[in-house]
Amino acid sequence: MPSALSTRLASPFRPFLSRDPLFSFQQEMENLMTRLRADWNGDGPTVLVTPPCDVSETEDAVQIRLDAPGYKAEEISIECTGDVIRISGQHKEEQSENGRTWHRVERRSGAFQRELGLPMPIKEDQITAECVNGVLTVRMPKAETARTRKIKVKG
């Protein structure tokens, strides 16, 4: 969990500090420790994966493509607050079958979470997402203030 001092200092200077590699490293370590504490189930930490993603930009939108193989749409959650988008997912554990002895269970368990800073303001109420063939695609239209406009100079 971020310390009160780092949160207080980071808030007004976030656009500048986010480019500092040491500040980013500190945030990543704090996130890792928070996840480790939150995911401890007594037997050891549960699996929390950080899936790879691509962030791209067109003239009118920002797009995130994230690998989420095996996840159903209802197992994925997306939250957007200001300039941060949080994508997470958790597999529901399969029901045990009577009369079956399990020797190893590795499939369909675990969770993932990605928290990404957005490069510009977006229209939060127009975000769309779909998961096809294990790839989650999130499309976020840019806010009018973030779009580049070309202005013709008259002579």
Image (cartoon, grey):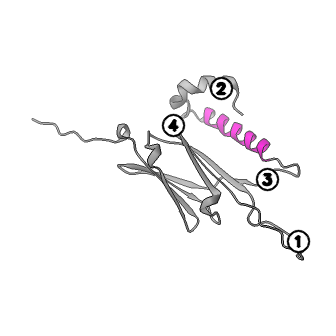
**Which kind of residue does numbered mark 1 sit on?**
His
Number of other residues with Cα within 10 Å of mark 1, as a class: few under 14, some 14 to 19, many 20 or more:
few
Front in this rendered view, residue 85 or 148 = 85
Residue indicated by mark 2: 6
If you read the primary sequence from the N terminus, does the residue marked by circle 3 or circle 2 appear first?
2
The image shows residue 38 at horizontal and vertical percentages of: 77, 43
In which quadrant is the C terminus drawn?
top left
The answer to the question of whether label 1 and label 3 lie on touching residues, with beta carbons closer than 8 A, is no
Under circle 3, the secondary element is loop
Left or right: residue 139 compared with residue 67:
left
**Which kind of residue does numbered mark 3 sit on?**
Thr
Please give the range of residues in magenta.
23-39
3D distance between C-alphas at marks 3 and 2: 28 Å
If you read the primary sequence from the N terminus, does the residue marked by circle 1 or circle 2 appear first?
2
3D distance between C-alphas at marks 4 and 1: 46 Å
**Which kind of residue does numbered mark 2 sit on?**
Ser
Residue indicated by mark 3: 46
